[in-house]
Amino acid sequence: MEFAAFRAEMVDSLEHDTKAAVQARATARAMREVPRHEFVEEGRRAYTDQSLEHRGTRVLAPSTVGRLVDALAAAEDDDVLVVGAGVGYTAAVLAEIVGAERVHAVDIDRQVVYDARSNLADAGYGDVLVDCRDGARGLPEYAPFDRVLVEAAAVDPPTALLDQLADGGRLVYPEGTTDQRLVAIEDRETASVHGPVAFAPLLVDGEQASALEQNRTVREDRERAAKEAQSRKGWEQDWIDWE
């Protein structure tokens, strides 16, 4: 009962603050139902409007989730794909709107996928499908999707995700690099813009937080440094070693 009161207070503030982060009734109703504390394990703090960290990735603040779900405008019985499973909270909110069996989520990080599955099952959304995939490739086995939500920034929406949209479908993603905006795409054209956002970029294989290397640049820089050290001879090598 205590957490239900916290949820109600959280959603009330998101609906009525100056930014009005949550405007759609369906979004508000869903966020009142989903036990966010099952996803972030922060007790009452789970219902404050702040982002958190999980396995080197950012857990979106409730206001950000509300904006994403509002922009997606999913309806009952829509088939939905979420690119970037995170802790599973956004997928759970969408499951309240369209039905858990109609929500699919992918994430490039295997450990994040395991955590999202566990969180969703514990919270009562075990029918949500969560798979370990390169998000830019989508989930073609379950396409087409009426709605696709990308929780990572890209300059352009990945072609594979556009191809997996159903006729009349909608794709929502953070567009840009440093200056980003939340964009909804329909019929491969920008349908609407939903204000500024700040998201981490869409990852490719090898960049996930649990990978041995964050990206190939780290490895290449190390290899170049090693080759350079081996190429030094005479006093230069002695001086560097002495330092």
Image (cartoon, rainbow, N blue to C red):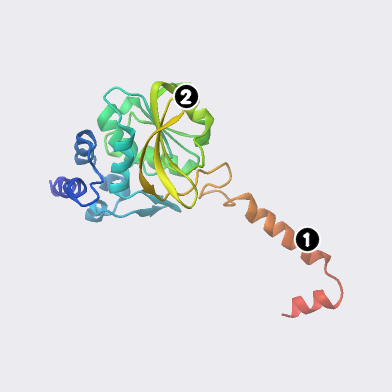
- Report x, y in % for residue 218: 63, 56
Which residue, given by chain and number where applicable, does mark 2 sit on? 164
SS state under label 1: helix
Query: Does residue 7 show up?
Result: yes
- Report x, y in % for residue 57: 44, 51
- Report x, y in % for residue 143: 45, 22
Which residue, given by chain and number where applicable, does mark 1 sit on? 227
Query: Does residue 139 show up?
Result: no
Q: Residue at x 22, y 33 (%)?
A: 26
Is residue 51 found left or right of 219 in the rendered image? Answer: left
Is residue 231 found left or right of 167 in the rendered image? Answer: right
Please report whichever mark, 1 or 2, sits nearer to the chain's N-terminal start.
2
The image shows residue 82, relative to residue 222, as above or below, that is above
Q: Nearer the viewer, mark 1 or mark 2?
A: 2
Residue that protrudes farthest toward the right in the picture = 234
- Residue 102 found in image quarter: top left
SS state under label 2: loop
**Who is closer to the viewer here, 23 or 54?**
23
Between the C-alphas of marks 1 and 2, the distance is 45 Å
Q: Residues within 10 Å of mark 1 (few under 14, many from 20)?
A: few
The mark found on residue 42 in the picture is none
- Report x, y in % for residue 33: 20, 38
**What is the three-letter code of the residue carrying label 2?**
Gln
